[in-house]
Amino acid sequence: MKFFLPITARDLMVLGYVLLKERSSIEGLKLAAAGLPRALRARRAILGRKRVSDRYIEGWFSFTPRALPLNCKPSAVSKIRKTTGRI
């Protein structure tokens, strides 16, 4: 629910733009609306199998960018650097 208002505001702006400026996308909105029941059924099935808490999932979404610490041994990181040249 934390992101409901920003997401809804963005969706309403997109809808307004399509209705006022880009009428060629109205057909795409109709297709998206027609696929909504199927998407909601899939969402329920996926959420029924979830294995982590809502709080953990919420950590992946933020209004500001952030990095999470890498949870592995330093020796593993150096091996990855040697083989790929990254990290």
Image: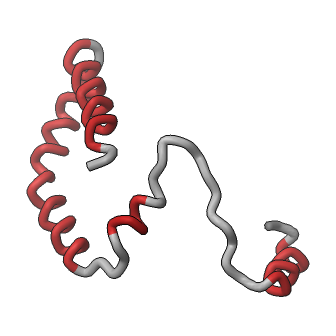
Q: In the rendered image, which quarter is residue 28 located in?
A: top left
In the rendered structure, the answer to whether residue 46 lies left or right of residue 6 reads left
Q: In the rendered image, which quarter is residue 45 located in?
A: bottom left
Q: Picture coordinates of residue 38 (x, y %)?
A: 13, 61
The structure residue drawn at horizontal position 19% and vertical position 45%, both measured from the top left corner, is: 32
In the rendered structure, the answer to whether residue 68 lies left or right of residue 9 reads right
In the rendered structure, the answer to whether residue 22 lies left or right of residue 29 reads right
In the rendered structure, the answer to whether residue 67 lies left or right of residue 1 reads right
Q: Nearer the viewer, residue 14 or 75?
A: 75
Q: Picture coordinates of residue 72 (x, y %)?
A: 71, 82
The structure residue drawn at horizontal position 27% and vertical position 42%, both measured from the top left corner, is: 4
The structure residue drawn at horizontal position 86% and vertical position 74%, both measured from the top left corner, is: 81
Give the tally of numbered discs. 0
Q: Is residue 32 above or below residue 13?
A: below
Q: Is residue 48 above or below residue 24?
A: below
How is the structure coloured here?
secondary structure
The structure residue drawn at horizontal position 42% and vertical position 68%, both measured from the top left corner, is: 56
Q: Nearer the viewer, residue 13 or 50?
A: 50
> Which quadrant: the C terminus?
bottom right
Q: Is residue 71 above or below residue 7?
A: below
Q: In the rendered image, which quarter is residue 48 located in?
A: bottom left
Q: Residue furthest top?
A: 20
Q: Nearer the viewer, residue 31 or 80?
A: 80
Q: Picture coordinates of residue 27 (x, y %)?
A: 18, 33
Q: Is residue 31 above or below residue 72?
A: above
